[in-house]
Image (cartoon, helix red, strand yellow):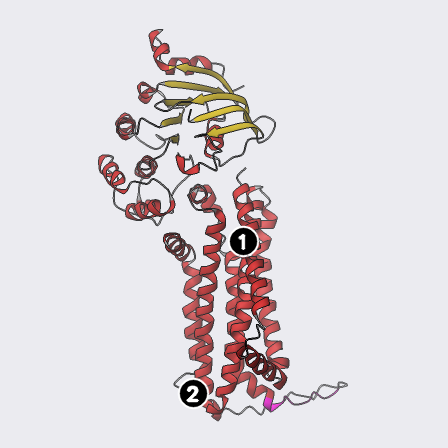
Amino acid sequence: MIVEFRQVSKKYNESDGLNPTDFSVREGQVIGLFGLNGSGKTTTLKLISGLLQPDNGRVIVANGTPRKNSQQISYLGDKMSFFPWMTTKDIRSFMSVMFDGFNPSKFDELSQSLEVPQKAMGQMSKGQMQRLRLVATMSRQAQLYLLDEPLSGIDLVSRSLIIETLIDVWDKQSAVIISTHEIKEIENFFDRALYLKAGTLVEDVIAEEVRKDNKSLTDLFIEINRDGVN
Amino acid sequence: MGLFRVIAWLESKRMKYLLILLPLIAIGTGVFLGIGKIDLTNIDYSFEYNSSSSGGMPSPPLSFNVLEQVLKFGPPIVLSFFALMAGGFLAVLAPFRGDREWSEGQFQLLRLSKHSMLSILLVRLTLYVLTFWLFATIILTMGSIAILRVDDDYTMLIKDAYTMFQIGFWTYGPLIMSLGIFIDSIRTAYYMKGSKIVTNIIPILGWLVIGLAISDAFQFVQGKLFDPWLFTAIRDVTLLGDTGIPMFKEPLLLTVLTSFVLCYLGSRILEEVEA
């Protein structure tokens, strides 16, 4: 088991955060973490990454605490970015020094595949920046990849290609958790889906079983959130 | 070594406008001291206070000797002291985690790296201390050159001034700078908790402290610094040092330990602030 969430909760104030939640993640799975804005997706990923500490419960990553095993987690945060003066080449050097398991040749290969330009972050478009962040995150050898809104800023045409490229290079001994509310273009890549609503895990489904019922993960998302945010 | 290089690179980029001030101050000091141009022996120091105000006691004329000493030794000592204070508060004036670092998540990136916050802060401290030691040494050397151009009889006093500077710098420099780093961590914590008053007031307090420190330094130079007993004491200490008695090891050890504790507390604050 790569991730174990045992009765984990986190509250920022009375309404926001995450209610007591249990789930676990095995190696080889691509998991979708779905929900509307404010449903607790980012909180869940931050708890797994160790950036946040739970109020109650226990988070176990690779048989240890997230902080202890932080180098087994490659996290693309929603607001996490490189310094704007850093060029693609600078980021390659920066990642090599600061993170374990960074593979420079994989970084070069992915940069080329996803057409990341060789210039400073501050001079890139939002989509180019997001591609670069994705490349840097996926170029690490880790047991768990956490991608928070990875398609934000990326045009509709490129979304599927980007996820396909990333899944292609992903080490199948690890797991990927992708948080998004833009499911449609990439829903075929998921093995499993966790649906959050107002800080509560309301559904934990195997994608294949949903498809057998002639439904899509998007249909289920709409069904769950039909009445909006509680 | 990799972390040292990366942090040096990040800090030089983050604080480039403040760091540009250092060579400008050094050049300004060189011009002020007139290295290679002005012969200070031609300056007439014999001016007096105006004592014509009614009812008051007449002010005594300034001591020629003290004023001459201040003019000769003041700039390098005061500017070295200024370098120390400016270095200490640079961390406050250019916070490690400003609005931009927070909103763009660059700090989170460092936080998730394989290096602990403590090691990152210790590297920052080492960089600040070395940078400002180099800067202050350059200033002091320029001052010494200016003094020697006036009169080469001052060689011994310059040696004393260097000794005094080294003792002062290594005793107080790391302390002031680690305090700056600690204050910056508190500022970050308050920034995260949304208390804008604290985050806005700390840099203002930092400037006030620098201003007061410079003012005190001038008074110190005028009143006490060149008393003969101080130089005699430094020579005695140096002699004791030559005999192997560790006169300045204890304060230095205390400084290293206190700086480490301040960096440790700062790192704990930065690690917990997200939670």
Quarter of image, res A20: top right
Q: Position of residue B4 (x, y in %)?
A: 40, 55
Q: Which residue is mark 2?
A: B38
- Against B16, residue A51 (above or below) is above
User: The residue marked by circle 2 belongs to what chain?
Assistant: B
Magenta part of the protein: which range? B57-65
Residue B258 among magenta residues:
no
Viewer-proximal residue among B118 and A134: B118
Q: Position of residue A76 (x, y in %)?
A: 39, 35
Residue B62 among magenta residues:
yes
| Residue A225 shows in this picture | no
- What is the number of the mark on residue B263? 1
Q: Secondary structure at mark 2?
A: loop
Residue at 27% of width from left, 42% of height from top?
A: A104
User: The residue marked by circle 1 belongs to what chain?
Assistant: B
Tags 2 and 1 both on a single chain: yes
Q: Position of residue B66 (x, y in %)?
A: 60, 87
- Against B64, residue B29 (above or below) is above
Label 2, label 1: how many angstroms apart (C-alpha)? 45 Å
Q: Residues within 10 Å of mark 1 (few under 14, many from 20)?
A: many
Residue at 29% of width from left, 45% of height from top?
A: A88
Callout 2, which amino acid? Ile
Q: Quadrant of the C terminus of chain B?
A: top right
